[in-house]
Image (cartoon, coloured by chain):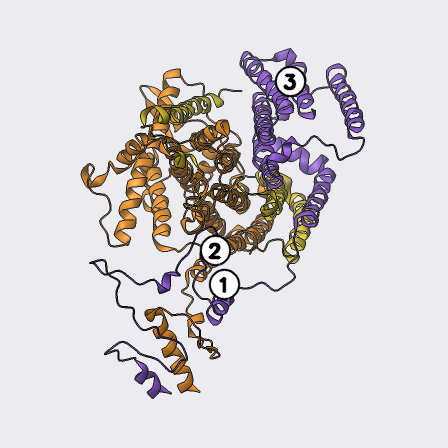
Amino acid sequence: MLRPYIPILFLGILGAALAVVSVLGGGFIGPKRYNRAKLDAYECGIEPTEQAVSAARFPVKFYLTAMLFIVFDIEIIFLYPWAVAFGRLGLFGLVEMVAFLATVFVAYAYVWRRGGLDWN
Amino acid sequence: MSTVTTATATATATVLAASPQTSVSEAVVFWIVAPVAIAAALAMVFSRHAVHAALLLVVDFFCLAVLYAAQDAPFLAAVQVIVYTGAIMILFLFVLMLVGVDSSDSLVETLRGQRVAAAALALGFVVLLIGAIGSATLQMPSQGLAAANAEGNVIGIARLLFTRYVFAFEATSALLITAALGAMVLAHKEQVVPRVSQREMSRRRFAGAHPTPYPSPGVFARHDAVDTPALLPDGTAAEPRPPVLEGSSNQAGRAGDPAGPGATGSGS
Amino acid sequence: MTQAVLAEPAPLPLPDFGSEPWWLIIIKVLFVFVFLLVLTLLTIWGERRVVARMQQRLGPNRTGPFGVLQGLADGLKLAFKEDIIPAMADRPVYLLAPIVSTIPAFLAFSVIPFGPTVSIFGHRTALQLTDLPVGVLFILAMSSLGVYGIVLAGWASGSTYPLLGSLRSAAQMISYEVSMGLALVAVFLYAGSLSTSQIVDAQRSRWFIIAVPISFVIYGISCVGETNRAPFDLPEAESELVGGFHTEYSSLKFAMFFLAEYINMITVSAVATTLFLGGWRAPWPLSLFSWANAGWLPMLWFVAKLCIFLFIFIWLRGTMPRLRYDQFMHLGWKVLVPGALVWLLLVATARALSFRDFLLYAGVPAAVVLLAWAFWPTGGRQDRPPPPVERGTPPRYPVPQLDAEPLRRSAGKEVTRA
């Protein structure tokens, strides 16, 4: 049962080997010329701020997007087995999926109407 | 905490459910992945750093996916990765970045009685697990994997989901609505003033007093770029061109410019 | 009742992947690995050459014939650059991020079929590394893991621009994953399977680009967004965010992100080929001959289709200006998502009523109209008269000469017309 995963494992090992060797090897091959400014965060030449982005200034919008993504992701996950078994489920399958999509669509319409999908 | 128990429970369930006919490969996978899962869960609980803890949780979820795959539930494994590691943990990371990294060090408990509640819930969860695993091992008539996956794993799931558990499936949509509403209530900032389009913004900027960009924060600007003279190849400053001022009477155009002040004047 | 009408011929069982001899598995794995690396190097070179042509330049032409080795030279140069770890960085996560972004990129390619069954050293085997009953889901899972590389890279750098870039990037990728996932559902409706080899089998008589054209369009747009490529390359909008999430990465660590980006581009192209363009199947006039779909030749069709997609990626980059973030999110959430949902319902209804050819005749024109609408030059806006210039107090700053000229002229015209 696990046999189809063996090639995936091999490919993963190869990819991981390449990535690890590159990430660790880069430090050995390249030159080392210490310079404090090089180690600073890049801020277009000005003195870097202490913390990257302070908590208060973080755009909360991303949270909303991630939440909406979860909602749709789960909806899509339900759609996949439904689509695969569509021929076997028949008209009943279509009806229940339409009901499901309509319910989720209510949430979608609400979020759209309130401006949750608008970005500035 | 709950992750540890989940990982342990899955591990135990794997052993118990599959004990009659565990194949060698499955056992090998189990004994490699399950310790990793538990170690990651423990490290997650004891990690001092919120983002590191979240990453360890990702490792844990991934290990669970591997265990699902080992038990011949490929759809569940893929969904575990897509939904839990791909969507929910991304949300976690967003939130962790949102609250700022350093607030992980705060040890002040703001929820009253949360320790008691946590202990009670954990106890309830353990009882539930014991009940479920016990009934699975002792009396539950089992169909066997071959029967469940007779038409293929995905179609088997679809058959159950869209016929026997159709009510639960439809109820999920209500949950999703709740999630979306909750997110809107918590995170949405209402737009009260009408949104300004880019066109409108650029129009305002040119109609206002300062069309050129302001100097960036933190930079000492001695000149706006517009009024600093260009340097000629020998290093001397180029003779500044007379500025064209909109609407002023002093409109000295370039010499020989056909569209100079004369052209404008004759047009009107 | 309906079920009898809808009953499809059961898809062929999956070949027995992973039970071949060890040496065969290793050959295949090495082939996929080398294929991805070489194709990445070639794509880097091809992109620079093609974009250069589009901009009337020559592009790199020094290293090797026609500059083919440019990608390799770039990689070697990166290897000999100084490896900098910023002082503010979170070291373990900072080192982990490029690895996390590379591995899933490779893995996603493992379920892509390259060709039909062939004979290698006397062994009959399919030209495909492996296949799962949930093959396409596996690809989606890997691409959702790829988001981590970006989020972690931005966060671990401990710097403002990378953090903002990574957030944008993650939000963008997850937004377009939605429309991408929705677009694929119609394909599964037709194929009745999630396995890549079975989906290719289901396109024996008709490619899905013809059966579900709108899905193809939506998938095509969203996979450009998913891979962060122009015109959706907002995460690395250099005018706003320096270099995006990998600003603080140098040397081979940067190369890993670069590699992952190109492999992802190759993967989405391969998925588009497999799901919509018949995978390794020969294009139409050739598909009438049985030799075109047997043996090693199909690999050529597959690679050719893949390269067409890669060319389109490059073409887009050479043609389109970058979108603004709000326009981009608007397109994703308000156009592609509802569009994909409505289209999916149409497809499902038509199939439930076994009314399939309706979609063929309605869908293809609809897709053409949609594309024409998307690419139609928007000339209408420029025709409007310029807004009247407010002639209040004269501004007290100098206006650059060249900018000021047309403004004055248009003001003059305004007066004339009045």
Q: Secondary structure at mark 3?
A: helix
Q: Quadrant of residue C268?
A: top left
Q: Position of residue C74 (x, y in %)?
A: 29, 36
Which residue is at the front of the view, C12 or C302? C302
Q: How many marks?
A: 3
Residue pointed to by mark 2: C324
Is the same chain shared between marks 1 and 2? no
Amino acid under disc 3: Ala
Q: Are marks 2 and 3 in contact (CB under 8 Å)?
A: no
Instruction: Report which colour depicts chain A.
Output: yellow
Q: Residue B11: which disc?
A: 3
Q: Position of residue A107 (x, y in %)?
A: 68, 50
Residue C135 visible in image: yes
Q: Residues within 10 Å of mark 3 (few under 14, many from 20)?
A: many
Instruction: Report which colour depicts chain C.
Output: orange
Give how far apart the Cα atoms at labels 2 and 3 are.
48 Å
Q: Chain of mark 2?
A: C
Amino acid under disc 2: Arg
Residue pointed to by mark 1: B198
